[in-house]
Amino acid sequence: MKFGRRLYSLIPLVPLFVLLGTMDSRTLLLIPLALMAIQWYFIGALFLLTTAAFLIYTKTGGLYGLTVMALALLAVEMGYLDRERAPGEHYLILIAAVAMAFPTYLLMSALSPVLPRLEVTALAALLLVVLYLFARLVSS
């Protein structure tokens, strides 16, 4: 039996729900929004904003917060790729681009005690631009 669409976007939602569920029981309210986020891109943007606001509200950051946001971004973007029936290479590029956030975070956290805040922010913005350019060059 062949299904009409792919549902790869459900894969990052499982570890996301596990991570959010261990943090606070109020995160269960994000589940319906997350399931709608893979269907509609606007709801996906609301899901990302709500997840970020919740992490800020609970003062959660570090690698845990980065992992939660990376999985949320993966779910929303993979939902878009599912709707567009994108080739497999696009999924790999998305996963590689999101995975590059972790070494970037570790680099910034290692450099932050050495450099003043403004330089760390500028360096993080520069790395973000380089990451964007890498993703654009690989996808074209």
Image (spheres, rainbow, N blue to C red):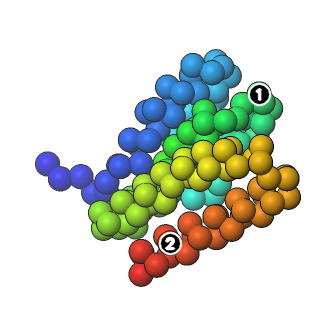
Q: What SS does tag 1 mark?
A: loop
Q: Quadrant of the C terminus?
A: bottom left
Residue of label 2? 134
Is 65 drawn above or below residue 85 in the view shown? above
**Upstream in sequence: badge 1 or badge 2:** 1
User: Are circles 1 and 2 on residues that touch, CB within 8 Å?
Assistant: no
The x and y percentages for residue 43 are 62, 52
The x and y percentages for residue 125 are 72, 64
Farthest-out residue, left:
1
Give the numbered dot on residue 24. Answer: none
Q: Residues within 10 Å of mark 1 (few under 14, many from 20)?
A: few
Camera-near label (1 vs 2) is 2
User: What amino acid type should be assigned to the residue bearing mark 2?
Assistant: Phe
Between 45 and 112, the residue placed more toward the observer is 112
Query: In the shown orientation, is residue 138 left or right of residue 48?
Result: left
Between 60 and 80, the residue placed more toward the observer is 60
Q: What SS does tag 2 mark?
A: helix
Q: Give the CA separation, mark 1 to mark 2.
A: 33 Å
Is 28 drawn above or below residue 34 in the view shown? above
The x and y percentages for residue 13 are 47, 38
Farthest-out residue, bottom:
140
The residue sitting at 57% across, 19% down in the picture is: 22
Asked where in the image residue 120 lies, by quadrant, the reply is: bottom right
Q: Residues within 10 Å of mark 2 (few under 14, many from 20)?
A: few
The residue sitting at 27% across, 57% down in the picture is: 4
The residue sitting at 65% across, 54% down in the picture is: 45
The residue sitting at 72% across, 31% down in the picture is: 60
Query: In the shown orientation, is residue 87 left or right of residue 2?
Result: right
Residue of label 1? 58
